[in-house]
Image: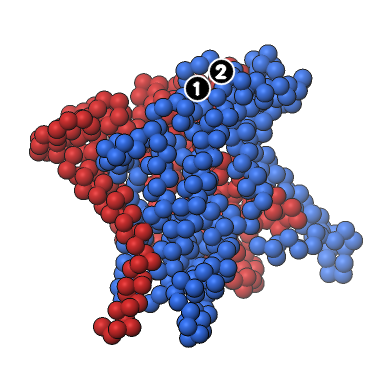
Amino acid sequence: MSLQERKNMLLGLTFISPWIVGLLAFILYPLASSAYYSFTDFSGFGAANWIGWDNYTRMFDDPIFAKSVYNTLYYTLLAVPIGVVMALVLALAMNQRLREVALYRAAFYLPSVLPIFALSFVFLFLMNPRYGLFNYVLGLFHVAPINWLGDPKWSKFSIVLLAQLGAGQYALIFLASIKAIPQTLYEAVELDGGNGWHKFWYITLPLITPIILYDVMIGLGSGLQILTPAYILTNGGPVDSTLFYVYYLYKNAFSFGDMGYASALSWLLFIVSVVLAVLVFRTSNRWVNYEANG
Amino acid sequence: MRDSLKLPDAPLVPRAGLTTDRLMGIVNGQIVSRLIVLIGAVLFLLPLFWMIVTSLKPVTEISVFPPTVLPQAWKWSNYTEAFRAIPFARYFANSSIIAVCSTIGAVLSNFLIAYGFSRIQWRGRDTVFMVVLATIFIPFPVTMIPLVVVFSKLHWINTYLPLIVPSFFGNAFFIFLLRQFLMQLPMELSEAARIDGASELQVMRQIILPLAKPALTVVAIFSFINAWNDFLGPLLYLQDERLYTLAIGLQAFRSTHDVQITLLMAASTLAVLPIIVLFLIFQRSFIDGITTGTLK
């Protein structure tokens, strides 16, 4: 290494040094530490005794763990496809050739940056089985009142509904990539006598698959970590129907003082997240067209 | 993005080559798509709208069925009552302190770090950057237990330090976003200044910093919003009610006191107000931030 190279290296490392410290202190150390805790009976206070794989084998006999996994998968498998379709539909709406389209874009986007806690409070009221606006509107169509948050059959779907307010953020990403598609491609479809549906199906959709992949990955990640709306809207209930994985992890760590078990749960989440990310990337070449954005 | 705004509406008088039928088709098509989009926009703004109108209704009007759209009697005093019934001012101040401090931390640290990953050539740089990207996918719940343990050993629980200090050590997504931006600025800018004898710090402050303002604005806005909206962080690190932020404060207050829905909605409206104001001022930055973060 020449003197100049060495100087540059030192300079570069100096500039990124805050990140190196952050990586060690806030990511690598906690990861290693929770791996260690996961093999102990650590309660948050006092000594941590080594108990081997007990925390991991315990999951197999824990019906609430199974329930929380079921709830989380149910939620994620419902929220991700609905979320992707919603974001796509919004992007197409944001792409309409209307004068006031900037207003619509703002309307679709704004709710996605509003705090979940405030939106949850208003959903509590909107979804009130007796006075809520939702049931009133359904009543106009002669639909029987729904106990949105009080009925285990509806509670997860209600949280999926709330999550749709975040779709505007992903819609903007879709919109940007739709706008990057060359007009000539659409003109070619027109020349062949294709209609709007053909344009969407044969041009738009194939060319935005990388963004769909991105959306699916982010959606899976945030779906598996869902906590706040369940904490505020339902407290995990009714009958544990919204006791999601991270909620159960949180309760084990901070309500039941079972940090060892919670750490094992957190490592399982870590492994699942990594596997999912790798899996989505690996299988993506079969259906994702990376030509679109170079 | 601007192009679509300039498109003319369908002409009212049929031109040569444009039959009346075809014209009607265009007009109808626009009306139908406009109607659908409009309904969608109304639905998306409905929760916010409902929050605001409910905050202005007398409490007796809440249990009226069918619900009234606009308040029959506008009760502005709900806002002053909310301040009396809920420790709102305190929560608001706490949220502001945390959001402002962590925004300062995020802008400072991520700029320096992204600078090191983009404006200086060093061996292994791009490999190390892959590590930055990989950390985006690590879920926070995986690291939260040891963090609480460490912060409590440091006696940082019931202080704002766990919510502020980490922002001074970079955030993978912001580093990525700023690096994208800084890579686009021509390298000749830095080289010319270096030849003139400027130190790297001078290059950074006098040449690059002024040019990076749009990207730094995006980082500032999003870190402010992240801090303002954060629920899990304050829930983990704050137990003293006097330190509560709006997110956990309103939730805790709501679940332990019998607070009227109209007052809760007034408090919620004020809690979302800073975000809406930011959005109205910096609409462009919001959109740029979202899109540059992912494309290319």
Left or right: A11 as drawn, with respect to A145? left
Eyeballing the image, is B126 above or below A111?
Answer: below
Task: Name the residue carrying label 2.
Answer: B259
Helix, strand or loop at label 1? It is helix
Q: Quadrant of residue A176?
A: bottom right
Q: Position of residue B11 (x, y in %)?
A: 85, 61
Labelled pair 1, 2 in contact (Cβ < 8 Å): yes
Q: Please tell me the numbered disc located at residue B253.
A: 1
Eyeballing the image, is A8 above or below A60?
Answer: below
Residue located 40% across and 47% down the image: B165
Let me know if residue A210 appears in the view: no
C-alpha gap between disc 1 and disc 2: 8 Å
Tint of chain B = blue
Of mark 1 and mark 2, the one earlier in the sequence is 1
Q: Position of residue A70 (x, y in %)?
A: 32, 34
From the viewer's side, name the closer residue of A124 and B246: B246
Identify the subunit bearing mark 1. Answer: B
Q: Position of residue A242 (x, y in %)?
A: 39, 29
Eyeballing the image, is A131 above or below A43?
Answer: above
| Amino acid type shown at disc 1 | Phe
Eyeballing the image, is A116 above or below A132?
Answer: below
Left or right: B9 as drawn, with respect to B130? right
Let me know if residue A186 appears in the view: yes
Left or right: B284 as drawn, with respect to B292? right
